[in-house]
Image: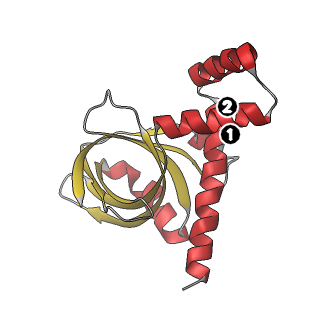
Amino acid sequence: MKTFKLCSLAVLFDDDHKKEELKGKQIPLADGLIINKEEAKKNWLVEAIVDKKWRSFFEDYASKNHQFMAEVTITKKTNDPATLVCSVKSVNELSEHLCVHLDGVIVAKKDDLSDMLLKNLVKEGFSGEALYEEFKKRKKDRGQAIQGVLTTAYEQVKENRFQDTKNK
């Protein structure tokens, strides 16, 4: 296992993709760690130390066993974020903060997103210079284009987890 400093945590969306108020919710951290479990399925354990006002937010996910897509930045805030599908494992009160444990499966790093975006553009029929220009445009925008790619990745991870649970 390898442990890294957690620099940022943002919830992108969850099982209910229509929750507009959830998109891009930055969770301010007092501290945090992220542990690469070094397993074949790219499992990570996130320990986020957050303000107590986030208790109901995370307890709601834990009680409903809902998953959500999150972006985490590791080691330095200037690093590119990694994207995980997470579930809340525990919410524990500390003297001044909450300690939230998340179990996550990595679905996309910066290079993965670029690859997925490029693949989608080719499927849409772009080629040559038009492909290059559209790729640059959507990569810069990062909004809806990346959101669609992440939604697809999120659904694939959920389906794989469902199949894994079913086969046990």
Q: CB under 8 Å between callouts 2 and 1?
A: yes
157 displayed left or right of 6: right
Find disc 1 in the rendering and name its residue.
Answer: 148
130 displayed left or right of 2: right
Q: Is residue 67 above or below residue 127?
A: below
Residue 121: % across, % down: 72, 31
Q: Residues within 10 Å of mark 2 (few under 14, many from 20)?
A: few
Residue 63: % across, % down: 50, 70
9 displayed left or right of 123: left
State the SS at label 1: helix
Q: Quadrant of residue 132?
A: top right
Q: Amino acid at mark 2?
A: Gln
In front of the other: 106 or 70: 106
State the SS at label 2: helix
Residue at position x 23%, y 55% from top? 2
Residue at position x 61%, y 50% from top? 153
Residue 144: % across, % down: 67, 31
User: Spatial distance from mark 2 to mark 1, Cα to Cα?
Assistant: 6 Å
Find disc 2 in the rendering and name its residue.
Answer: 144
Q: Is residue 43 above or below residue 83?
A: below
Q: Residues within 10 Å of mark 1 (few under 14, many from 20)?
A: some
Quarter of the picture containing the C terminus is: bottom right
Residue at position x 47%, y 35% from top? 110
